[in-house]
Amino acid sequence: MKKHKITLIPGDGIGPELTEVTKRCIEATGVSIDWEVCEAGIPAIEKFGDPLPENTIQSIKKNKVCLKGPITTPVGTGYRSINVALRQVFNLYACVRPFKVYKGARTFYQNIDLVVVRENMEDLYAGIEFEMGKPETLSIIQEIDNLSGKKISADSGISIKPISISGTTRIVKFAFDYARKNRRKKVTAVHKANIMKFTDGLFLDVARKVALEYPDIEFEDRIVDNMAMQLVQKPQKYDVLVCPNLYGDILSDLCAGLVGGLGLSPGANYGDHVAIFEPTHGSAPKYAGKNVVNPSAQILAAVLMLYYIDEKAAAKKLEDALSRVIEKGEYTTYDFRPEGTAGASTTEMGQAIIKEMED
Ligand code: NAD
């Protein structure tokens, strides 16, 4: 049997308890993995004084596949997002988030099965920001006034939104290739081209051109605000959404809400050589160490990883076991139950999934 070497980043907050349960579930599929455990986020600062240590980067570079728990990003101050940094370091330009309603999930909706393909490198996430009051910020404000005649208040901070032809072509092609490979029928490009003509307008133009190369897949576009409403009213109409970075981020959480919450929403970040699998949710610090959160998103991220490393039978076995546990409802966490009701613990849900695979 093939033994896979994979980097495991437990992360912080609820990350360590989720990755531990996930590791045990993967083990129960019979797939053999040699985990190289590496730190990032708060534990890495405590140990190495660096939220993203070089040995973590080297491990991912070497193994090319990484399963990752969530990592806290301090708001406003402190270091920048490690999640964003990892995507930048490894050029993980495509974020894929499947959203599916599992029978037994707490949701008003049924029959949702859509995928958000989010551009991961550009847009307002490029990290090009200028702090209010700094000399370089004032100089940019002055230059914008010179070039465009538009006045920006001197007490402004500035974030730059770059969207390129090359970056957009790459992500839209990825979305169409994904649709073809996964027998999906339609790609919807999401934008705000009516307002941001030179960024979102470019995104839409490129998407329309790329769509011509895929006559077998239906193509349409939606303005992002309308998209948000349509997703709430008739999510079943959508199949693959391709979005610039920020809209992809926001709509992912909206879609998570449709299918029963962040605890059920996995994600994969793909580059040409490296892939990192993680839940869509964050480190939920208020639940850290309490053994109460839903492990499904982390486990479903592992399912995506198993497909990626070509362990298809194990991937299916794990997803089927998870879906049976959700449907039976006896060992599900609090977020599957009416507001204010306690649920099974994270580890109990994990054990139930393992038992389903053994039965
Ligand atoms: P969050 O996703 O951590 O949690 C928001 C809420 O969602 C929680 O309070 C909880 O009610 C619910 N939730 C999340 N995961 C759950 C689970 N597995 N089971 C049940 N309920 C769950 O969002 P936040 O509080 O805005 O962010 C906390 C930290 O995580 C921040 O520092 C943020 O930057 C970071 N973050 C990291 C990632 C990542 O690692 N990729 C992604 C998003 C946010």
Image (cartoon, rainbow, N blue to C red):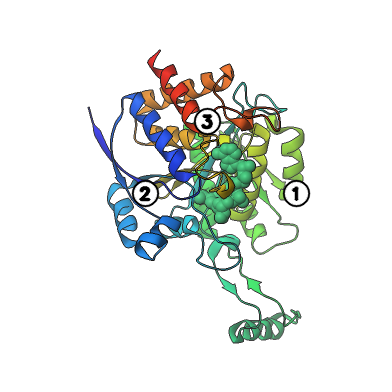
Q: Nearer the viewer, residue 311 or 300?
A: 300
Q: Nearer the viewer, residue 320 or 233?
A: 320
Q: Nearer the viewer, residue 148 or 103?
A: 103
Q: Nearer the viewer, mark 3 or mark 1?
A: 3
- Label 3 sits on residue: 345
In the image: residue 37, left or right of residue 131: left
- Label 2 sits on residue: 274
- Label 1 sits on residue: 225
The amino acid sitting under disc 3 is Ser
Residue 292 screen position, x and y as percent: 55, 35
Looking at the image, residue 329 lies above or below residue 13: above
Decide which of tag 1 and tag 2 comes sooner along the chain: 1
The amino acid sitting under disc 2 is Val
Sort mark 1 into few (<14), some (14-19) or many (20+) by Cα contacts within 10 Å: few
| Image quadrant assignment for residue 240 | top right
The Cα atoms of the two marked residues, 2 and 3, are separated by 33 Å
The amino acid sitting under disc 1 is Asp
Sort mark 2 into few (<14), some (14-19) or many (20+) by Cα contacts within 10 Å: some
Residue 102 screen position, x and y as percent: 59, 25
Residue 282 screen position, x and y as percent: 55, 48
Label 2: which secondary element:
loop
Residue sitting at x 63%, y 38% = 256
| Ligand 1 closer than 8 Å to label 3 CB | no
